[in-house]
Image (tube, rainbow, N blue to C red):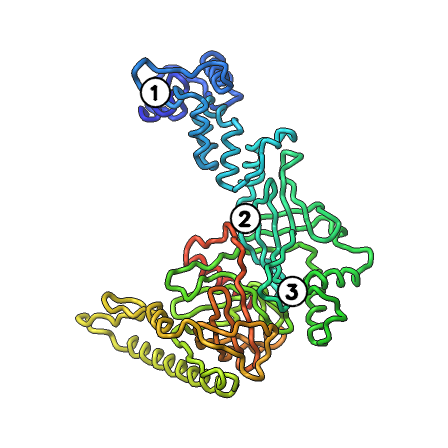
Amino acid sequence: MAVCARLCGVGPARGCRRRGAAREQRRGDSEPDTDTEEAGGGGAAEEEEEEAAERIEGRRPAEAGPAGRAPLSLLELPPELLVQIFGSLPGTDLPNLARVCTTFRRILRTDTIWRRRCREEYGVCENLRKLEITGVSCRDVYAKLLHRYRHILGLWQPDIGPYGGLLNVVVDGLFIIGWMYLPPHDPHVDDPMRFKPLFRIHLMERKCATVECMYGHKGPHNGHIQIVKKDEFSTKCNQTDHHRMSGGRQEEFRTWLREEWGRTLEDIFHEHMQELILMKFIYTSQYDNCLTYRRIYLPPSSPDDLIKPGLFKGTYGSHGLEIVMLSFHGKKAKGTKITGDPNIPAGQQTVEIDLAHPLQLPDIENLRDFSELSRIVLEVQEQVRREEQEEEHGQEEEDSSPQPASQPAAMPLGEGAEGEETVAGAQGTTQDKAPASQPFVLPMGVISRNEDYPRTCRICFYGTGLIAGHGFTSPERTPGVFVLFDDDRFGFIWLELKSFSLYSRIKVSFQNAQAPSREAFDEMLKNIQSLAT
């Protein structure tokens, strides 16, 4: 109790709410609760409130303690110093601070405190003083916009059947905006991402947040956002007529085609590709921006990773460019689809790279021979199959026969003390032995949407790619070659399809997208894959 009195400087004589129950019982008369604005009492409480107001506004100097001693309470400090102290605290702690006493509550009405919290917690760099014109305070912006909708900031995947998507919700000035990120037009995989707004939330004219749908070509209109549960929210457009165009569905399709593919239907001569494009338009346009979103995280990185994990754009034949997340998991690397197609939907693991089995490519002349590359890959596939069988057989024997207590358990790969040969160590050794770069060319007969692929590579690994029929029927993993070109580009040769996919890193700094833990990221991957299945 003594500590509380020294901090807030109110104590029993000033109505401190934190005084102990025993002290209250010893007092004959209870004192007014100065934390409640509506409470009566006059006298000391009203005098204190008036005194605090004058000090904050600069009409009365701050109280000073006896000469030669330091202040014993916060209330003996100048109000401007209290503003600095309170402004350095997290915004979520300030409501509790306001309950201490009337003086603290009055100081916490100072907009300078909330302006600082808006800037430091949410990066609002706009001139918040302009809000005074509209009668909206920085405290309103913090409490009714930024803090209220903080849970939807970050990366999200919309539930649009097999197609998925990538939504980035950010604080943009005095708005919260949901940007849908789109790959560049096929097959320009190295071009930057495109993006368009789907919704925005702002607090400019009224003292309650306004949600607006940005879908369509008629400007912002009335929308709604509902936070369904942790890591999930939904959007709804209340004026879907704003999405319609005067020329009907044909005009809407032509406009969508130019935005999505950068071309007209007459420019696409492949009949199967035309069918896929028309199917996607019909399927996605029926949602009218009424969607459910689930949170996704960027993959955590480690110094032992082959390259920095993250999001990449990749070529997928007639399906165009799609977004893939590359992550590392010990001896494996995985490419998970963030956007997908009717064959392999979003959320599925499109490629898996076996980092324990690097491939030594033949010389450039023999590399042009598809049969030679196929022979090398199939030999490694057989080797991997034998190792998996031996591992399963060894595990069965270990389970059936108990290990003697005196014999130490076998140290699994990736652990150890002195000569620990970890997966990362073995991988690093492989890279050390490999040349800095080696010539690379696609074998004859392998189809590539982008002929402008790199002609040198760093290293190659055995991997598998997921293929399936329309509607994700008869899915199977088939052998392939993972080709690392540089820190920002890699490729995958699908042997069975005789096809090549080129991937290029998405160079965007996404905020609020880091996983709180490795376990949370793995759980997220499992969830989006189960939803896709």
Front in this rendered view, residue 454 or 184: 454
User: Is residue 347 visible from the viewing direction of this image?
Assistant: no
Q: CA distance from mark 1 to mark 3?
A: 66 Å
Q: Which amino acid, mark 2?
A: Leu
How many residues crowd around disc 3 within 10 Å: few (fewer than 14), some, or many (20 or more)?
A: some
Task: First in sequence, mark 1 or 2: give its number.
Answer: 1
Neighbours of disc 1 within 10 Å: few (<14), some (14-19), many (20+): some
The mark lying in front, picked from 1 and 3, is: 3
What's the residue at 39%, 70% (across, down)?
A: 331
Is residue 512 visible in the rendered structure shown here?
yes
> What is the three-letter code of the residue carrying label 3?
His
Secondary structure under badge 3? loop
Q: Secondary structure at mark 1?
A: loop
The quarter in which the N terminus is drawn is top left
Residue at which label 2 appears:
153
Q: Quadrant of residue 293?
A: bottom right
- Distance, label 1 to label 2, CA atoms, is 42 Å
Q: Which residue is mark 3?
A: 185
The residue wearing badge 1 is 71
Q: Residues within 10 Å of mark 2 (few under 14, many from 20)?
A: many
